[in-house]
Image (spheres, helix red, strand yellow):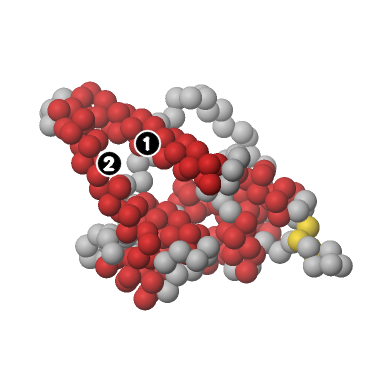
Amino acid sequence: MSIGEVLAHLRTEFPDTTISKLRFLEAEGLVDPQRTASGYRKYSWNDVARLRFVLTAQRDQYLPLRVIREQLDRMEKEPPAPQRPTLVAVGTQQPRDLSDSRIPKADLLERTGVDEAVLAELEQTGLVVARPPGWYDADQVIIVEAVVGLTRFGLEVRHLRAFRNAADREVGLFTQLLAPLARQHDPAARARAADTARELQALSQRLHAALVRSGLRGELGR
């Protein structure tokens, strides 16, 4: 498969994956696709399985690439024994709350590929927020990865402050809607607040994406 075909396979489960991300994982030694005589990458299904393992470990466990690479090496040397499949009721699992994840700075830097100077700039502009005494939650990793992707197209950190300002305005607006539920001591009310927050986030993302698509379509004359 070409890198574009691999991306199409993975994006159904990992929508934030980009070609740049796949190239980065290759550079880090997580996958080693073959090359054609003209230099194009050709991926096997085993390569796709390795990439899916890496992306899952990053998304669900926030493991640094070094640890994931070690796990892959062990799996190749010692294939796991067949296990009886576990039946899981579809649609009954609740989304994991990763807000309390504690990710050391070294792991964040390794996973995203940024250096400390860039991370310091992101913190100074308010795009990234460290938690005392120097940990980062899961969302900060996502923010850094997104910033890295945007800067590859020529944007600078100073251009991205508008995202922080827009997010702060949304937080203020949504907080007004959630406050009556969040202030209640009833666990059921707090659960409804959490569900409402997730739905507001999803609707906000859909609205933002549609507005950007619509605007770009007009600029491109499509």
Q: Callout 2: helix, strand or loop?
A: helix
Q: Position of residue 121 (x, y in %)?
A: 33, 70
- Residue 146 versus residue 121 in the image, above or below: above
In this orientation, which residue lies closer to the viewer: 207 or 178? 207
In this orientation, which residue lies closer to the viewer: 16 or 86? 16
Q: Looking at the image, which residue is at 53% across and 63% down?
A: 153
Q: Counting residues from the N terminus, which is met first, the one under dot 2 or under dot 1?
A: 2
Q: Which residue is mark 2?
A: 170
Q: Callout 1: helix, strand or loop?
A: helix
In this orientation, which residue lies closer to the viewer: 92 or 137? 137
- Image mark for residue 204: 1
Q: For the C terminus, give its image quadrant.
A: top right
Q: Amino acid at mark 2?
A: Glu
* Disc 2 and disc 1 in contact, CB within 8 angstroms: yes
Q: Is residue 175 left or right of residue 214?
A: left
Q: Amino acid at mark 1?
A: Ser
Q: Position of residue 40 (x, y in %)?
A: 78, 63
- Which class describes the residues within 10 Å of circle 1: few (<14), some (14-19), or many (20+)? few
Q: Position of residue 77 (x, y in %)?
A: 68, 61
- Which class describes the residues within 10 Å of circle 2: few (<14), some (14-19), or many (20+)? some
